[in-house]
Amino acid sequence: MHTVVVGTSGVTASDVLAVARDGARIELSGEAVAALAAARGIVDALAAKPEPVYGVSTGFGALATRHISQELRAQLQRNIVRSHAAGMGPRVEREVVRALMFLRLKTVCSGHTGVRPEVAQTMADVLNAGITPVVHEYGSLGCSGDLAPLSHCALTLMGEGDAEGPDGTVRPAGELLAEHGIAPVELREKEGLALLNGTDGMLGMLVMALADLDMLYKSADITAALSLEALLGTDKVLAPELHAIRPHPGQGASAANMLAVLRGSELTGHHQDDAPRVQDAYSVRCAPQVAGAGRDTLAHARLVAERELASAVDNPVVLPDGRVESNGNFHGAPVAYVLDFLAIAVADLASIAERRTDRLLDKNRSHGLPPFLADDAGVDSGLMIAQYTQAALVSELKRLAVPASADSIPSSAMQEDHVSMGWSAARKLRTAVDNLTRVLAVELYAASRAVELREGLTPAPATRAAITAVRKAGVEGPGPDRFLAPDLAAADVFVREGRLVEAVETVTGPLR
């Protein structure tokens, strides 16, 4: 099994994906263990002094004015975890919780938190054992970190609360730790706070969304090319010299992908046949511009994610010169903004895909295709309601595109009076990514059927490969009406698992 070594300088997106989705094992580097011990020495020295230090010998948030005596500090750290583990609602997905815990461990290992090495090792042990704390949908405002979600994870480290075992069964966390020979941690000064105070949940969901969208944007280029082909459109608008004079990188990459997919097609360029056209509709002609803008948004979001992956987010932090200083680095605004930007781009990509599907189904705009791609229109309804489903998904995506980060609601007796709502932005983006996948699956279903209905004209080798692969995946081709939901579900899985991209790349080579 792949092993991820956590040091002091952060982790990569591939590390997060390996731990969250593939169950990679985690090891702490010797450098990280030394940094942990050094920072802990600073915290211990400050804890022994009479002067109050936030998070070490004081209360938290609006209660930070109270100095806590030494005999109550262990109780203080336990209490912050217990009281902050106040999430409600449905459980959060296992991969999100694993990403959340791993990214908190990343910051702990930076040597800026003052957590003891044994606490960090316990975090790694819990992840390696396949134990996943129960984390709930609601509880984070995206400021002072993802407090409630991280608290539920810290509760598991203490042997309290509930967690899911490697067999998928939810049980008391103490039982699961005992079965795997893991001793619950006894938190000391600052450690409870350090386990809670980060943007790890929203960052983990951003990293996973970026990976998913990288594949889905390639899928969208493929389905757009299929639709262009089915509509007898022109591929001249994809010429690199046209995109060079508006040099947005994403636009150029999207156009290059579509051109590669369409290479060798006999269906493109029939504008002067029986129904002459000067230009294709915007949903066809402007596909690279819309998808390209989304790709450039992805690039910006990836830059933000990379910076966060290299960050140590905590409050207070231990600095190399021995100071322990309060700060505002836990504020989730940088991550929240790009999560919302991505939701907007996803909604627009789905919207243009739905417009192409509708054009394929309308006999007045499809340039010779049967109404709704039906076998016997009137007797058969064809794909009429598949487009309804796609339209419903697009409408939902428009609602999900409303930014969460534009909102703020004060908390902690107005001490925390401006928050990012980044967790909420991440949660809705996950739904948006799921819905985009379904929208592209419907376009794939319609466009592949439409291409097959163009008798006498040979599609491009790459689109033929895509259609052959999707048929082998259980998605049926043209014919009389049948129960559509299973076909659409199979198309969804085909796109979601990246098999559409894989099929096309066997012909084109790697897409951009």
Image (tube, grey):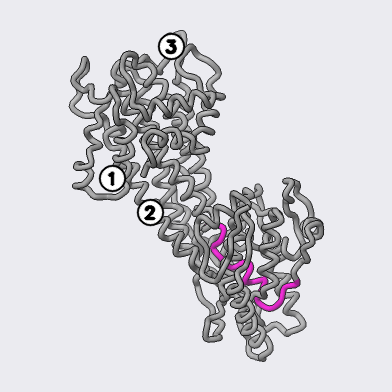
Give the SS element for disc 3.
Answer: loop
- Residue 120, by quadrant, is bottom right
Q: Residue at x 37, y 30 (%)?
A: 462
Image spot of residue 466 (x, y percent):
43, 29
Q: Residue at x 38, y 54 (%)?
A: 299
Residue type at numbered disc 2: Ala
Residue type at numbered disc 3: Asp
Q: Is residue 28 above or below residue 376?
A: below
Image spot of residue 237 (x, y percent):
23, 35
Residue type at numbered disc 1: Gly
- How far apart in space, not on screen, are marks 2 and 1 (Cα)? 14 Å
Residue at which label 2 appears: 299
- How far apart in space, not on screen, are marks 2 and 3 (Cα)? 43 Å
**Which span is picked out in magenta?**
186-202
Q: Residue at x 67, y 75 (%)?
A: 116
Please give the label number shown on residue 375: 3
Q: Which mark sits nearer the N-terminus, 2 or 1?
A: 1
Residue at which label 1 appears: 252
Name the residue at the bottom extreme: 50
Q: Is residue 417 above or below residue 402?
A: below
Q: Residue at x 48, y 45 (%)?
A: 212
Q: Does the segment drawn in magenta span residue 200?
A: yes
Q: Nearer the viewer, mark 2 or mark 3?
A: 2
Q: Residues within 10 Å of mark 1 (few under 14, many from 20)?
A: many
Q: Is residue 410 in view from this perspective?
A: no
